[in-house]
Image: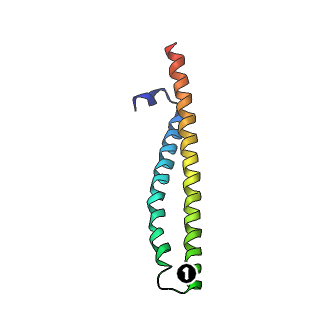
Amino acid sequence: MKLLCYASGAEKFAIFTGWFFAAVSGSILPVFFLFIGPAFDAFGTKSAEEARDETRKISIIMGCLGLGIMITSFLQNFLLLNTSEKIAAKIKTKYL
């Protein structure tokens, strides 16, 4: 946190927002794995049509979760890398 003394208010906000997106991205992955069990269970005792419908529902949910991971991971990387480059440039300028 010592390096945040070089950051402006907007940069601090971007860093904390990036950390928030990192937490959301990390918490979506275990939820994603909760749907793998029911996807395999759908093939067990049900008929072919019921298994297809159940698998389709679970696949749509897993696709949405995957899209959520993609968006939050992109925002996390963009915000943290972009802001850290700006802060590093400020530190280098003050050093030189």
Does 71 sit left or right of 1 as displayed? Answer: right
The answer to whether 16 is drawn above or below residue 72 in the figure is above
Q: Where residue 79 sits: x, y (%)?
A: 56, 40
Q: Find disc 1 in the rendering and name its residue.
A: 51
Indicate the position of residue 63 as horizontal and vertical percent values: 58, 64
Crowd around label 1: few <14 · some 14–19 · many ≥20 (10 Å): some
Residue sitting at x 50%, y 30%: 7
User: In the image, residue 84 lies at what x, y percent?
Assistant: 52, 32
Residue 37 visible in the displayed image:
yes
Which quarter of the image is occupied by the N terminus? top left
- Element class at badge 1: helix
- Residue type highlighted by circle 1: Ala
Residue 33 percent coordinates (x, y): 45, 64
Q: Residue at x 48, y 58 (%)?
A: 28
Residue at position x 48%, y 26% in the image: 6
Q: In the current view of this chain or complex, which residue is farthest to the top? A: 96
Nearest the eye: 78 or 45: 45
At horizontal 48% and vertical 53% (from top left) the residue drawn is 24
